Amino acid sequence: MTTPRTMRLPCWTCDAEQRHRQLNKAEQDWLKERLGRTGVNEFWLCENVLDTDTGKQCRNLRTGFVMKPFPKAVRVPVPE
C-alpha cells in the first residue's frame, strides 16, 4: 500500500499552517459525486486534530494553490 503525499499548507478554517494530505479513493469518489466532476486530484485534506479527546479532524478541503476554493468550507465526511 502506498503512503499518501503530505504537505504543510495554510488552512483557512484552522487559521494556521497544518498538515494536509491527498485524498484516498473513497474520499475522491465522494467529492466527485458532490461536485459532479470527473477529476479531483488537485484537492488536499486538512488533518489538524480539533478535539484531542475524540480525535475529530478538521477535514477541510483546499487545492495546492487556492486556500479557499469554495465559498463555504467543504469538509470530507469520516469514512465508516
Image: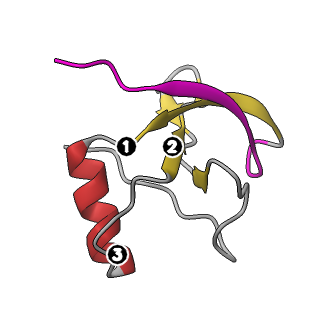
Q: Which element is circle 3 on?
A: helix
The amino acid beneath tag 2 is: Leu
- Looking at the image, is 56 positioned above or below residue 74? above
Quarter of the view holding residue 67? bottom right
Left or right, residue 6 beside residue 68: left
Q: Residue 75 or 10: which is nearer the viewer?
A: 10
In the displayed structure, would residue 77 be above or below residue 11? below
Q: Please tell me which residue is depicted at 58% across the width and 42% down the height of the picture.
A: 58
Residue under the image location 29 percent in, 40 percent down: 24
Q: Quadrant of the N terminus?
A: top left
The residue labelled by disc 3 is 34
Identify the image quadrant of residue 48: top right
**Depth order, front residue of 7/72:** 7
Query: Where is the C terminus found, in terms of image quarters?
Result: top left
Of labels 3 and 2, earlier in sequence is 3
Looking at the image, residue 40 sits to the left or right of residue 59; the answer is: left
Write down the residue under mark 2. Answer: 45
Mark 2: secondary structure: strand
Residue shown at 70%/52% (left/top)?
65
**Would residue 9 be counted in the magenta stretch?**
yes
Residue 29 position by quadrant: bottom left
Residue drawn at (78%, 31%) of the image? 17
Q: Are marks 3 and 2 in contact (CB under 8 Å)?
A: no
Q: Circle 1: is it few (<14), some (14-19), or many (20+) Cα within 10 Å?
A: many
Q: Viewer-nearest of labels 3 and 1?
A: 1
**Mark linked to residue 23:** 1
Boundaries of the magenta span:
1-14
Q: Is residue 48 left or right of residue 2?
A: right
Element type where label 1 sits in the image: loop
Residue 15: x and y in percent read: 83, 43
